Amino acid sequence: MEDVLDILVVDDDEVDRTLVRRALQAAGLQLVLQEADTCASAIATLKQQSFDCVLIDYLLPDGDGLSLVQAIRSIGIAVPLVVLTGQEMSKLPSQ
C-alpha cells in the first residue's frame, strides 16, 4: 500500500494551487493537500499540523518565499521546503 503524502501549498493564486494539485495527482501520488494563501496563514497552519513537504510560491501578498523559509526555520519547524515561481529569474530581487 502506498503512503499518503501530506503537502501544504502556499500560493495566493487559486489557479496556480489547482495546477500544482493536478500535476501531483497526474504523477500518481497519493496525497492530501492543504492550502494557504499568505505567509501568516502558512505559519499558523504549520504550527498546528505537520506535513511531508511544503511548496511555497515566491511572491506572496505578505512577504516572499525566501522570507517564509527563514521564518519557518526560525520557529524550529523541520520540513522539506520547495520555493516555486513563475517569474523570470531576472525579475526577482537578488538576495
Image (spheres, rainbow, N blue to C red):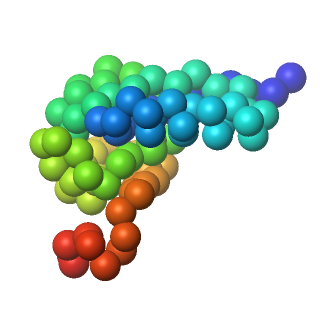
Task: Name the image quarter holding the C terminus.
Answer: bottom left
Q: Position of residue 5 (x, y in %)?
A: 63, 30
Give x and y (percent) for residue 56.
38, 46
- Would residue 12 be seen by someone viewing this image from the given angle? yes
Compared to 95, does 27 lie above or below? above
Query: Residue sitting at 64 percent across and 26 percent down?
Result: 31
Image quadrant holding the N terminus, namely top right
Give the residue displayed 26% in from the left and 70% down from the top: 92
x then y, percent, for residue 69: 29, 53
* Residue in the image at 31% along x and 55% along y: 58
Q: Position of residue 38 (x, y in %)?
A: 23, 35
Task: Report the number of discs.
Answer: 0
Q: Does residue 74 show up?
A: no
Please name the residue shown 48% across and 49% down the image. 80
Residue 21 figure quarter: top right
**Between residues 95 and 2, which one lies in front from this camera angle?**
95
